[in-house]
Image (cartoon, rainbow, N blue to C red):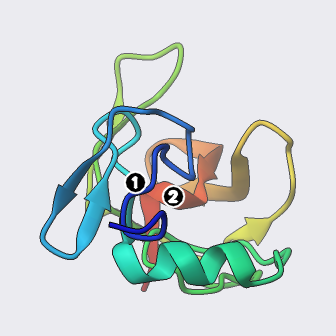
Amino acid sequence: MTEAQNPTNCPKCNSENIYQDGNLWVCPECSHEWSIHATAASADAPADNHIRDANGNILQDGDSVIVIKDLKIKGSSSVVKGGTKVKNIRLHDAGDGHDISCKIDGFGSMNLKSEYVRKA
């Protein structure tokens, strides 16, 4: 196998504990999945400054997104359920990975990570 087909670390969290599932590599620590073929292409492609959802779609201010998994709210016993639709998001770079500002009905204003949402 070449290096493109046998990566040693997760590109998201740099974990060494990755495994192959069909045509995808999977990281059990951060749940990131990437294509075997995209690994070589991503090394050659220039980095863009776009914020992307879990499926790789580019997000913009005002978009609507859907939460893809249950998210515990820090400092509370509440949970934002997977499938919750969030309208009119605002994008920003907080530096801590929370790059979406939004208001969720029943929870109020909060920040989300783009890796846990998909474009609606």
Image quadrant where residue 35 sits: bottom left
Q: Residues within 10 Å of mark 1 (few under 14, many from 20)?
A: some
Left or right of 113: which side holds 26?
A: left
Q: What element carries label 1?
A: loop
Q: Nearer the viewer, residue 57 or 2?
A: 2
Left or right of 59: which side holds 66?
A: left
- What amino acid type should be assigned to the residue bearing mark 2? Glu
The residue at the point 45 percent across, 55 percent down is 7
Mark 2 vs mark 1: which is more N-terminal? 1
The span from disc 2 to disc 1 (Cα, nearest Å) is 9 Å
- In the picture shown, does residue 102 fall above or below 97? below
Q: Nearer the viewer, residue 52 or 111?
A: 52
Q: How crowded is mark 2: few (under 14 residues within 10 Å), some or many (20 or more)?
A: many
The residue at the point 59 percent across, 51 percent down is 113
Provide residue 33's location: percent of width, then percent of height.
Answer: 35, 61
Q: Which of 31 and 26 is in front in this view?
A: 26
Q: Name the residue under label 2.
A: 115
Q: Name the residue under label 1.
A: 32
Q: Which residue lies furthest to the left in this view?
A: 22
Image quadrant where residue 59 sits: bottom right
Q: Is residue 31 visible?
A: yes
- What amino acid type should be assigned to the residue bearing mark 1? His
Q: Which of 42 and 119 is in front in this view?
A: 42
